[in-house]
Image (spheres, rainbow, N blue to C red):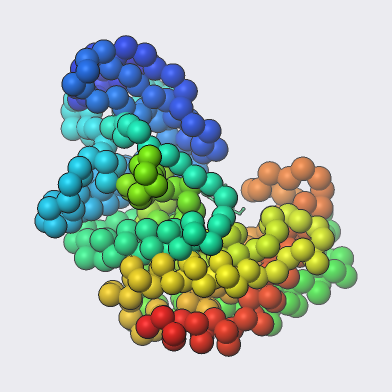
Amino acid sequence: MKEIISHFAIQGTVKEVRPLGNGLINTTYKVETEEADAPDYVLQNVNVAIFPDIDLLMHNIVEVTGHIRKKLEAIGTYDIDRKVLQFVPTTDGKYYYYDGEKYWRIMVFIPDTVSKSGVSLESSYIVGKTFANFQAMLADIPSELGETIKDFHNIEWRLQQLKDAVAADPLGRAKEPEAQEILAEIQKRAEFMSKSERLHREGKLPKRICHCDTKVDNILFDTEDNVLCVIDLDTAMPSFIFSDFGDFLRSAANTTREDDPDLKNVSFNFDVFQSFTKGYLEGARCFLTPIEIENLPYATALFPYMQTVRFFADYINGDTYYKVQYPEHNLIRTRNQLRLLQCVEEAFPQMEEFIQSQL
Ligand code: GN1
Ligand code: MG
């Protein structure tokens, strides 16, 4: 570890390196330094199976954090080093080091922070506001960023993947009568749900820098419960703002977990929708276009729909992407997300009314 760290331009001398956190994708360590006036660091081994283009990944992250830092400086923010992540270059000026086997990066450790998880009305409001502020700060970023997972939230691409899965049908799962019913449910909404891609092609819907993993776990708080900064920037990339809005609600506003087989437990928690949307619009109203605002209910439906398509394609493909605990797991998840979609569809008039009341 010390050999790896020696390739980075850190301050101080390394005292100890030990595992940090429980991330599912990257492996993370805390690096403690001897000197009291040198910061501690976070060392990460980047999972290039999920993020294959490390140059693009680190380019995005350095641009995003650099732009936020400039914004904070411009408004005279106090304690900036706690309000945006800071990555450390290698001694030859790159932002990652390849040891012949693994890819490593280092950022400055922010001390005395608190992390949270789970969903409450209060945290939904904070998540809405924090990620809206994140998008707002990045709305005028001059640099070109790329997609760290190509076509991640492109519904036309996800529908194509499902079509390919059904054509190949390696286990004969697509031929089951229930599968045909699910396919019909997906098909009848396909055109409506592809609206975002259509609007984008027509030049009416921009891509902006989004976080794409919107949840309270990805916010650092100080010990007095104030928001410090947004973390886990690997999926920060150009997308429709619908990604941050809709994907949060897909998981947070479902009244049960996404693989609950009992569909009676699935419903759309409108209180979570209200708290989150209130916070989101407070932060994002200043830059959103009328088309973006008008389509927030669509975004709320798009993500359960997209997840239905993704889980179902994986079921047909024989469970090659999502980990499964039993053979029908992806089918259970598919039914759950389809049910959530139906609940969201029923809430369209109330969602529209609530959004209007917030403008
Ligand atoms: C995956 O691993 P996790 O739970 O953070 C997936 C998301 C899906 C989610 C569904 C890179 O996220 O897009 O919404 O599962 N991430 C990737 O549970 O495919
Ligand atoms: Mg995740």
- Depth check: give the residue in front, 161 or 242: 242
Name which residue lies at 32% across and 32% down.
111
Snapshot quadrant of residue 145? bottom left
Name which residue lies at 47% across and 23% down.
19
Left or right position of 78 against 157: left
Position in image of residue 299 (x %, y %) = 51, 74
Position in image of residue 98 (x %, y %) = 35, 27
Q: Is residue 157 above or below residue 102?
A: below
- Depth check: give the residue in front, 160 or 97: 97
Left or right position of 171 against 21: right
Q: Quadrant of the C terminus?
A: bottom left
Residue 208 shows up from this direction: no
Name which residue lies at 43% across and 72% down.
278
Q: Is residue 6 above or below residue 117?
A: above
- Depth check: give the residue in front, 208 or 352: 352
Snapshot quadrant of residue 140? bottom left
Q: Is residue 252 above or below residue 102?
A: below
Q: Quadrant of the N terminus?
A: top left
Residue 136 shows up from this direction: yes
Left or right position of 129 against 38: right
Name which residue lies at 40% across and 30% down.
44
Left or right position of 338 against 301: right
Position in image of residue 275 (x %, y %) = 49, 68
Position in image of residue 239 (x %, y %) = 40, 65
